[in-house]
């Protein structure tokens, strides 16, 4: 798992040289320029992107999860691209076309990336795999199975209704679209490895509508399976907190890992959320330490210029940290090993 404090990417080796990339974030290269953190990592360890990556999954379309995603799809030529079922519907495609015009506005950035992905696939004659709850995303010859746990039909319907309502009238000015929270169509996944499982929480939130509690009682893919490893949902936010995740979907004291969200006045996870997770497991890690990016007061003329141009100043992002967890397939006594690289840390030191 990779993340610098804004952005998230998960790289999964599901056995026998078969890789899956879940979401994408950007990292700066030492020699200049930027590249997908997942692409950098896989090239570093000698993975052939064109033949060994079988799935690229966009869990949802927020900017911190799809940075550089179109380049990932382009580099992983044989991979199937997977995204939420809602992205095939006319309500979303019409919405995206309005907000993906070639301009520098922050309004365009997330949907521009998705449109670039779809155009890249079209050039290669491929179509996405559209996912909803209980879709089988991948199954290997060693019976490692990857299932989607969300979104439900109800969440897809809700998202499309809000996307349609956000469409501007003809010739009207585009306005800010907000973050479309809660993350109605985020794709949580279960990786069933036979004697164990891994839960990838994406940015699925519990409120409103009870997404996680609905997964617990309604997902056929769960079938009583409990995971020993958990990618903590939505950066450990209060909105993703659900006791049923820890009590029903996870084994006691699981290995938990998250990417922090350092932007804005209330970085995630909060101190209270950190304490709550540490009470549940001693095996909790973060890909980076939290850094405050709240703006400071500047000269009046500078502030006025920033407002006039709709510019924002943020602290420079640190390099992405890596949390790597490994265990051997087919070994019922196997334990997870943990390696921390770069700015990654144990969760108790996330503010240290």
Image: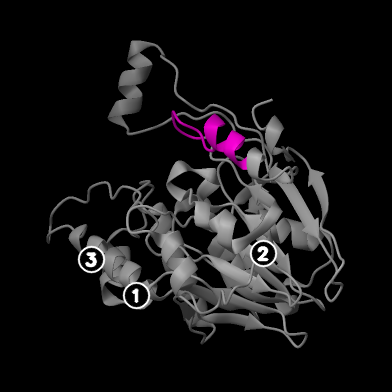
Looking at the image, residue 265 sits to the left or right of residue 159; the answer is right
Where is residue 222 drawn, in percent x and y? 56, 74
Q: Say which residue label 1 marks.
A: 153
Which mark is nearer the camera, 2 or 3? 2
N-term mark: 2 or 3: 3
Mark 3 and mark 1 lie on one chain; the one further toward the N terminus is 1
* Residue 266 drawn at (x, y percent): 46, 31
Alpha carbons under labels 1 and 2: distance apart: 25 Å
Disc 3 residue crowd, few under 14, some 14–19, many 20+, Cα 10 Å: few
Q: Given this view, does label 3 or label 1 mark the residue nearer the observer?
A: 1
1 vs 2, front mark: 2
Which of these two is toward me, 219 or 259? 219
Q: What residue appears at the point 37 percent right and 61 percent down from the top-left corner?
A: 184
Q: Is residue 111 above or below residue 19?
A: above
Residue 289: image location, x then y, percent: 66, 33
Please provide the residue range marked out in magenta: 263-277
Residue visible at 84% across and 61% down in the picture: 45
Q: Tell me the residue that label 3 is attached to.
A: 161
* Residue bearing mark 2: 227
Examine the rendered structure and indicate whether residue 168 appears above or below residue 303: below
- Callout 1: SS: helix
Residue 327 visible in the snapshot: yes
**SS category of the residue bearing label 2:** strand
**Is disc 2 surrounded by few (<14), some (14 to 19) or many (20+) residues within 10 Å?**
many
Q: Is residue 197 left or right of residue 202?
A: right
């Amino acid at each position: 798992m990779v993340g610098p404090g804004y952005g998230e990417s998960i790289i999964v080796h599901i056995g026998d040289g078969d890789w899956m990339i879940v979401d994408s974030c950007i990292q700066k290269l030492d020699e200049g320029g930027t590249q997908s953190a997942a692409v950098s990592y896989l090239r570093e360890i000698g993975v052939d992107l064109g033949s060994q990556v079988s799935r690229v999954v966009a869990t949802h379309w927020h900017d911190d999860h799809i940075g550089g995603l179109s380049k990932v799809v382009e580099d992983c030529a044989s991979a199937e691209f997977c995204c939420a079922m809602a992205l095939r519907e006319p309500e979303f495609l019409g919405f995206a076309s309005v907000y993906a015009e070639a301009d520098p506005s922050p309004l365009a950035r997330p949907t521009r990336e998705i449109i670039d992905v779809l155009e890249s696939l079209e050039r290669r004659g491929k179509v996405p795999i559209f996912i909803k709850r209980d879709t089988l995303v991948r199954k290997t010859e060693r019976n490692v199975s990857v299932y989607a746990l969300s979104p439900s039909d109800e969440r897809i319907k809700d998202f499309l209704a809000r996307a349609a309502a956000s469409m501007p009238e003809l010739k009207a000015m585009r306005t800010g679209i907000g973050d479309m929270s809660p993350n109605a169509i985020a794709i949580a996944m279960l990786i069933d490895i036979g004697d164990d499982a891994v839960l990838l929480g994406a940015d699925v939130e519990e409120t409103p509508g009870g997404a996680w509690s609905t997964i617990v009682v309604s997902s056929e893919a769960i079938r009583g399976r409990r995971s020993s490893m958990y990618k903590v949902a939505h950066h450990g936010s209060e909105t993703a907190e659900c006791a049923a995740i820890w009590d029903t979907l996870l084994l006691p004291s699981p290995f938990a890992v998250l990417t922090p969200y350092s932007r804005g006045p209330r970085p995630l996870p909060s101190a209270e959320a950190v304490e709550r997770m540490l009470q549940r497991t001693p095996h909790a890690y973060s890909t980076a330490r939290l850094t405050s990016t709240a703006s400071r007061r500047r000269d009046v003329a500078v502030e006025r210029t920033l407002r006039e141009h709709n510019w924002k100043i943020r602290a420079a992002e640190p390099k992405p940290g890596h949390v790597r967890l490994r265990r051997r397939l087919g070994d019922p006594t196997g334990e997870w090993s943990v390696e921390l690289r770069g700015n990654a840390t144990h969760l108790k030191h996330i503010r240290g």
